Image: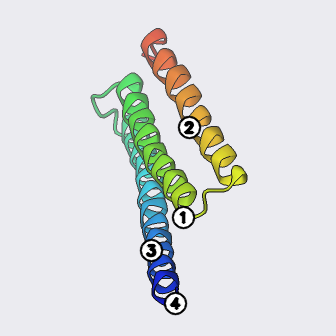
């Protein structure tokens, strides 16, 4: 029984470590996308760099959606680590938010022209 407990604790620690790693990766991707879009927007406005606001927006939207994919991984790992009802609800909420955001962001990018 003691060996099973040690393996179980090790498994939980490994999952928790990867939750932290993937959460950090998702956060970095979203921050990078925001900073890059800001930089490109500044270049567009100040130097009249030849690009479109639509393209900047698409790139930002893609980074946000990609970062949110990592948050889904974090929620899945959290559910594996602690398969409680609250973790399952959290996973469902994260997936629902990501799906809803993805739908509306991609629809908005397709519908609107900003130039």
Going from N to C along the chain, the mark reached first, 3 or 1, is 3
| Residue at horizontal 50 percent and vertical 56 percent from the top | 74
Badge 2 element: helix
Q: Which mark is residue 95?
A: 2
Asked if the residues shown at circle 2 and circle 4 are in contact, with their CB atoms under 8 angstroms apart, the answer is no
Horizontal side of 98 relative to 88 (left or right) equals left
Q: CA distance from mark 3 to mark 1?
A: 8 Å
Q: Residue at x 41, y 60 (%)?
A: 25
> Which-is-in-front pick, marks 4 and 1?
4
Q: Gap between marks 4 and 3, in whole Å?
A: 14 Å
Q: Which residue is mark 3?
A: 11
Closer to the chain start, of discs 2 and 4, is: 4
Q: Which numbered disc, 4 or 3, marks the residue that appears first in the sequence?
A: 4
Residue located beneath label 4 in the image: 2
The residue pinned by badge 1 equals: 81
Residue 26 % position (x, y): 45, 54
Sequence-first disc among 4 and 1: 4
- Farthest-out residue, bottom: 2
Q: CB atoms at circles 4 and 1 under 8 Å apart?
A: no
Q: Tell which circle, 2 or 3, labels the residue nearer the N-terminal end.
A: 3
Q: CA distance from mark 2 to mark 1?
A: 18 Å
Residue furthest to the left in view is 50
Kindly report which numbered mark, 2 or 3, lies closer to the viewer in this rendering. Answer: 3
Q: Are marks 3 and 1 in contact (CB under 8 Å)?
A: yes
Between marks 4 and 3 in the image, the one whose residue lies nearer the viewer: 4
Name the secondary structure under disc 1.
helix
Q: In the image, residue 51 lies at what x, y percent?
A: 30, 28
**2 or 1: tag closer to the N-terminus:** 1
Kindly identify the residue that appears in the image at 48 percent across and 86 percent down: 6
């Amino acid at each position: 029984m003691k060996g099973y407990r040690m393996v179980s604790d090790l498994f939980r620690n490994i999952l928790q470590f990867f939750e932290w790693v993937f959460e950090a990766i998702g956060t970095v991707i979203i921050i990078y996308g925001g900073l890059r879009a800001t930089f490109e927007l500044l270049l567009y406005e100040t130097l009249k760099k030849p690009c479109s606001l639509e393209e900047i927006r698409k790139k930002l939207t893609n980074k946000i959606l990609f970062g949110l994919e990592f948050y889904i991984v974090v929620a899945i790992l959290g559910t594996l680590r602690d398969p409680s009802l609250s973790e399952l609800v959290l996973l469902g909420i994260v997936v629902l938010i990501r799906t809803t955001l993805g739908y509306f962001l991609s629809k908005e990018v397709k519908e609107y022209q900003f130039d």
